Amino acid sequence: MGMFAVNAFLIFLLVIIAVVALNVHRLFALVMLSGAFSLTAAAQFVVLDAVDVAFTEAAVGAGISTVLALATLSLVPREEKPHAIAPLPALIAVATGALLMVSIGDLPQFGAADAPVHIHVAPDYISGSEKLIGVPNVVTSVLASYRGYDTLGETVVIFTAAIAVLLILAGWTRAPHLRDGETENTHIAQNAQDREDGQKDAG
């Protein structure tokens, strides 16, 4: 009963944060709510004994993503532009959520020893980790070998997202501010000349 109460409280808190975030128009408050949502989700993963997932969620969701979002606020207005809720995406989201709620009934009981993952997959990993992979730590062998391509894909996605965010923050994706009577080509040439002059002055 105690763990059920903790899980229910965390899920209720996630719902409250999500509802408040939908009604907030100030971007700074929205970023803070997003970080709070990720931190609460990380606590939920800890309760479910998924500490590795909780660590990733706390580091990426509540940590790096929040810092990058706060840095991005210097490039955008303080409040979001008013817009109407698109009916089709909202309908798809509600239908997907309802489908997931219905499918929960087909899942095995949490922590059940006769769950398929404990009968078919986990014993192979445990028995073959040191013999086939040569790594005594099962978690390391799963992430680096059994799920090596999956881990590589996740790394590539995170790296690509980080590069994209840095390019946005550096201004590479924004149109240049042109002076009166100035074209884009002359603007580029003038910037190149200014860099050359700066390098000469530094030398």
Image: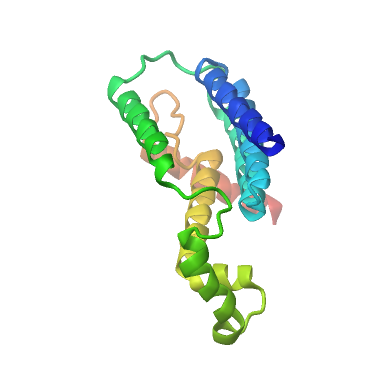
Depth order, front residue of 28/107: 107
Q: Where is residue 121 in the image (x, y as percent from the top left)?
A: 48, 68
Residue at 32 percent across and 30 percent down: it is 95
Depth order, front residue of 30/42: 42
Residue 200 against residue 103 in the figure, above or below: below
- On the question of residue 59 being in view, the answer is no
Depth order, front residue of 16/2: 2
90 on left or right of 62: left
Residue at 45 percent across and 16 percent down: it is 81
Residue 161 against residue 6 in the figure, above or below: below
**Picture quarter with the N terminus:** top right
Q: Where is residue 73 in the image (x, y as percent from the top left)?
A: 59, 28
- On the question of residue 141 being in view, the answer is yes
Residue 97 against residue 138 in the figure, above or below: above
Q: Position of residue 90 (x, y in %)?
A: 34, 24
Residue 172 against residue 163 in the figure, above or below: above
Depth order, front residue of 56/50: 50
Splitting the image into 4 quarters, where does residue 97 fall? top left
**Picture quarter with the C terminus:** bottom right
Total marks shown come to 0
Q: Which colour scheme is used?
A: rainbow
Q: Where is residue 129 in the image (x, y as percent from the top left)?
A: 58, 79
Q: Which residue lies furthest to the left in this view?
A: 88
